[in-house]
Image (tube, rainbow, N blue to C red):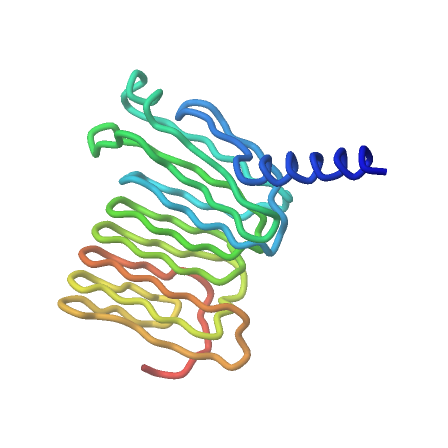
Amino acid sequence: MRTLSAVAGAAVLVWNLAGLARAEVPCGQTLDAPLRPGAVLTVHSRPAGLEIVGTDQAAIHVSCTSGDEGGAQHIRIRFKGNQDDETLTIAGDLHKEDNVRVRIEVPRKTSLRVEMSAGEVKVEEIAGDKEINLYAGQITISSTRAWDYRKVDVSVTIGEVNAPVYGAQKGGFFRGITKENANGEFSLHAHVLTGQIDLLGRSARATTD
């Protein structure tokens, strides 16, 4: 019985370790791993262009390109976590002139947390909570489906908030839009210190600021 228990314990340990470090590849190679719909995905990235797209697959698929093929080998893409809380990290020596572009395909129903110092974040066709923060750059959130947000809080310290989905456009210092819709399902928080936020989609019903 002790032998069986030891084997079972070892199997659990191996499974847990595998969950903590599920995949790692350099830029230029693709990363594929299972991702449960409804999970929370946290993305930490050095400055880059990120495109996060919703699909009907229960998996994450990441592809990366760089203008510097040699430098791409120094850019690492790591994916780890568990079935409910996953983390994708893009690390290494990323420079603006390298033009690093990362496409991240995830299940359509995924909650996102994105932290990046500078660059561009595009989120397309994702149904879930979102929290996205940039120091400098642009955030674009778009959907061809119903704009289903319970609470929206987007702001820039210096820059522009362009939200045709709410019929609003604001520019300057400390500009933002706050909306609420009791019939919505998800929450959206986005902030850029210096730059621009675009909210694109079907017109939404919401309370005024």
Q: Answer above or below: position of 205 versus 85.
A: below
Give whichever of 20, 189 is nearer the camera: 20
Q: Is residue 144 left or right of residue 34?
A: left
Give whichever of 80, 34 is nearer the camera: 80
Q: Could you tell me which residue is drawn at 25 percent across and 58 percent down?
A: 192
Q: Answer above or below: position of 188 versus 12.
A: below
Quarter occupied by residue 77: top left
Quarter occupied by residue 48: top left
| Position in image of residue 187 (x %, y %) | 46, 68
| Position in image of residue 145 (x %, y %) | 54, 60
Q: Could you tell me which residue is drawn at 41 percent across and 24 percent down?
A: 26
Q: Is residue 77 left or right of residue 116?
A: right
Residue reaching furthest to the right: 1
| Position in image of residue 18 (x %, y %) | 59, 35
Q: Is residue 74 left or right of residue 52?
A: left
Q: Could you tell me which residue is drawn at 22 percent across and 64 percent down?
A: 156
Instruction: Specify the quadrant that holds the C terminus.
Output: bottom left
Give whichever of 2, 114 is nearer the camera: 2
Q: Could you tell me which residue is drawn at 53 percent across and 48 percent down?
A: 54
Residue reaching furthest to the front: 2
| Position in image of residue 49 (x %, y %) | 32, 40
